[in-house]
Image (cartoon, rainbow, N blue to C red):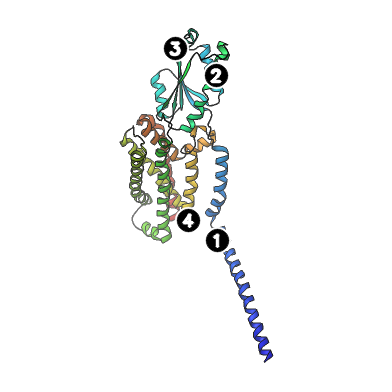
Amino acid sequence: MSAFVTAGSSGESREPNETRFGFWRRSYAMVVKEFIQLRRDRVSFAMIVMIPVMQLLLFGYAINTTPRNLPTALLLQEDSDLGRSILKALQNTDYFRFTREVHNVAEFDDLLLSGKVLFGVEIPRGFERAVRRGDYPAMLVAADATDPVAAGSALSALSAVVQTALDHDLHIGDPASPPFEIRVHARYNPAASSRLNIVPGLVGTILTMTMLIFTALSVTREIERGTMESLLSMPIKPVEVMFGKIIPYVLVGFVQAALIIGIGVTLFGVPVRGSMILLALLSTLFITTNLAIGYTFSTIVQNQLQAMQMSMMFFLPSILLSGFMFPFAGMPVWAQYIGEGLPLTHYVRIVRAIMLKGATLQNLQYDMLALLALMLLAMTIAVTRFRRTLD
């Protein structure tokens, strides 16, 4: 009887031990299996490493909320000692970098309208003589205020320019009132309203995110389900598959753009000073470019998770380096080169220029051609990759 009890007690004591160790063995097996799967999923592993590294490098080196060396046009109607001292004082602030010298007001206005410069400085004829006679002349500084962050710091530095020029040329110390005026004209957004800057940029940002994901997932879903091979077994070419996948989403993107712009105009009071037809055409070009890039991603990745990860990998530098969140002109040169290769950079310029400035196609030729080139490049890569990986 005692032996039976002892044997029973021993069995009961072994069972909890086996349960406990069995739990850890099974958990360990799942951990090993997950690491093996992660090692095989190279795209996901690359995203784990690259996303934090990219964020650190971009925020550490490329992003600057107090931009300097901003491109500035000069309309110098007289070459005088005082005029040169004023220009030197402007450059010494490190905010202004004179990149263009124009000869008339029309060229001056066109550079601001096209976004090639952010500031324009005009010194009128007879300026120094008027100062010495006490006529209190005005020097004009025109600023593209569609980006209040980029313009604000530079305009606040203008107050020191007057005294620097006086000390250098007139040697009159600190007068009760300065003998000339710096007249600032903040164009396109004189109230420095942040919503006028953000809402147009949101059109491109939302379209970039949705169009990339829609197309990448649409094609990858076909591959995972095995229906893509069925499509290719039919008398249809890869380029025809690509256009068939892209065109419906062009209409979806167009509806999205119209919805965002409509809300921006009605609820936030964002003006549309330019042509709506031009805005619609260039928006269609931008949507198609993003869809072509998303289609390219779908030919690289193996599943929908990787397609989502690669889309987010492309979206991160787009939102940081396009000029939507941070001033584009204040970034280092290498970051600007990367930004020029992103469709969102060109579309942000386009949508802000049309809505806030009333820009025409002539003012937007560079950004339109850049979008067209990016679209054709993405389509070429997509068709080539598609043929090689699925034929």
Residue at label 4?
A: 305
Residue 382 seen in the current view = no
- The residue under the point 53% across, 29% down is 68
Q: Position of residue 123 (x, y in %)?
A: 46, 16
Residue 225 seen in the current view = yes
* Marks 1 and 2, how far apart at CA: 62 Å
| Neighbours of disc 2 within 10 Å: few (<14), some (14-19), many (20+) | some
> Closer to the N terminus: mark 1 or mark 4?
1
Amino acid residing under circle 4? Leu
- The residue under the point 48% across, 54% down is 306
Q: Along the line of sight, which residue is nearer the eye, 221 or 259? A: 259
* Marks 4 and 3, how far apart at CA: 64 Å
> Closer to the N terminus: mark 2 or mark 3?
2
- Whether pointer 2 and pointer 4 mark residues with C-beta atoms closer than 8 Å, the reply is no
Residue at label 3?
A: 125
* Marks 1 and 3, how far apart at CA: 74 Å
* Marks 2 and 3, how far apart at CA: 18 Å
Residue at label 1?
A: 37
Placement of the N terminus among the 4 image quadrants: bottom right
| Neighbours of disc 1 within 10 Å: few (<14), some (14-19), many (20+) | few
Q: Along the line of sight, which residue is nearer the eye, 71 or 179? A: 179
- Whether pointer 1 and pointer 4 mark residues with C-beta atoms closer than 8 Å, the reply is no
Task: Quadrant for residue 54, please give it.
Answer: top right
Q: Residue furthest bottom?
A: 1
Amino acid residing under circle 1? Gln
| Neighbours of disc 3 within 10 Å: few (<14), some (14-19), many (20+) | few
Q: Position of residue 58 (x, y in %)?
A: 55, 41
- The residue under the point 43% across, 44% down is 378
